[in-house]
Image (spheres, rainbow, N blue to C red):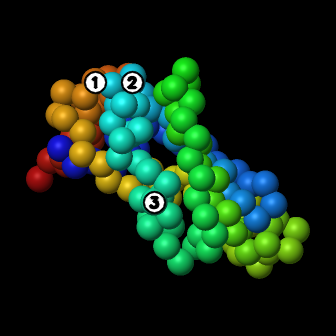
Amino acid sequence: MKVPLWRVAFARSGDKGDTANIGLIAYTEKVYSILVEDVTAERVKEHFKGICQGSVERYELANLRALNFLLHESLGGGGTVSLMLDAQGKTFGVALLRMEVDVPDDLVLEADHVSGWKPRAAPES
């Protein structure tokens, strides 16, 4: 099943100067294995095309089920000099969670259980 990352992971983001820093944390060990394969530095660079002007570095933190991404030259010079609305990169984590990945149905359901996510009931007509 193709799903947005927010179904199987959560994220935090911030800045260090002109570099956005995004932590992507999988809800389960099995999902983490998929993210290691699918969420590459190259895919993240493409996802932030037009925003990230520099390179993207990826670090694996298996003990935390996390990937950490550094998006160089993404914040218009950094918080004190940037004219960007989000000069500290606080929304970058949410933006990354919109990326889609292929995850088996059973692992999506397992992640939903861990995260507590439930689809909304359709409004009655």
Helix, strand or loop at mark 1: helix
Q: Which amino acid does label 2 sit on?
A: Thr
| Mark 2 or mark 1, earlier in chain | 2
Helix, strand or loop at mark 3: helix
- Residue at 33% x, 36% y is 34
Helix, strand or loop at mark 2: loop
The N terminus - image quarter: top left
Q: Nearer the viewer, residue 20 or 61?
A: 61
- Residue 112: which quarter of the image? top left
In this view, 106 is above or below 22:
above
Query: Horizontal placement of 78 versus 65: left or right?
Result: right
**Callout 2–callout 3 Cβ contact below 8 Å:** no
Judging by the rendered image, the residue that carries numbered circle 3 is 42
Mark 2 or mark 3, whichever is nearer to me = 3
In this view, 59 is above or below 26:
below
Q: What residue type is labelled 3?
A: Glu
Query: Horizontal placement of 19 versus 4: left or right?
Result: right
